[in-house]
């Protein structure tokens, strides 16, 4: 007894024609999903480099974990190179994670309204975190002055 498995390409075994129910339609999404897939792969590779560079500089160079304090971060963020490094890490990690959660929402949220609201919450949280993180990186002041008095901390030089 032989079992012939019918190919999705046709209604007849071995005909080579694509069955109408398996034809790809012209979706309204265009190439978005393919670009999102490609972004996940490329951003993942870049994130590995950024994260391991971050860990190496913070944990292996200098005093290691014992040297990480307010002054260490202030010194790093005084250099535009490290500002860009941390900004790239923030943006790529947030966009990479958001795209992954978007995919999970698309796969598991069954109702359109549920899918919509989950994505609204996801995108709103992403925007808030990216905006606040970017502001912190670029407006960080290691020597704040409040009401004409420099805050104590020992890092800043005496006025």
Image (spheres, rainbow, N blue to C red):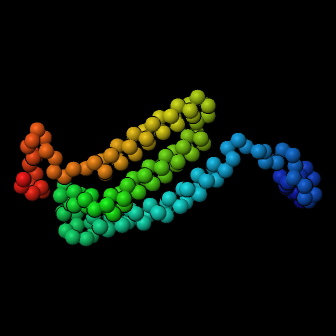
On the question of residue 66 being in view, the answer is yes
Q: Picture coordinates of residue 91 (x, y %)?
A: 43, 52
Which x, y percent locates residue 100?
52, 49
Which of 51/150 is in front? 150
Q: Residue furthest top?
A: 113
Residue 83: x and y, percent? 32, 58
Residue 25 is left or right of residue 119, and the answer is right
- Residue 77: x and y in percent read 27, 58
Q: Which quarter of the rendered picture does the N terminus lie within?
A: bottom right
* Left or right: 1 as drawn, with respect to 48: right
**Quarter of the view holding residue 106:** top right
Residue at the location (84% across, 44% down)? 21
Between residue 2 and residue 50, name the one nearer to us. Answer: 50
Q: Residue at point 9% right, 46% down?
A: 150
State the image quarter where residue 87 is shown: bottom left
Report the front residue among 51 and 30.
30
């Amino acid at each position: 007894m032989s079992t012939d498995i019918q190919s999705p390409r046709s209604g007849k075994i071995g005909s080579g024609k694509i069955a109408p129910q398996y034809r790809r339609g012209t979706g309204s999404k265009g190439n978005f999903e393919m670009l999102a897939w490609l972004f996940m792969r490329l951003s993942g590779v870049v994130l590995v480099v950024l994260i391991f560079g971050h860990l190496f500089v913070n944990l292996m160079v200098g005093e290691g974990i014992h040297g990480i304090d307010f002054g260490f971060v202030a010194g790093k963020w005084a250099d535009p190179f490290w500002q860009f490094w941390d900004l790239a890490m923030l943006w790529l990690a947030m966009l990479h994670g958001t795209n992954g959660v978007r995919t999970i929402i698309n796969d598991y949220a069954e109702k359109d309204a549920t899918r919509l609201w989950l994505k609204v919450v996801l995108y709103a949280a992403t925007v808030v975190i990216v905006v606040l993180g970017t502001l912190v990186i670029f407006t960080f002041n290691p020597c704040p002055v409040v009401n004409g008095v420099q805050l104590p901390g020992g890092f800043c030089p005496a006025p």
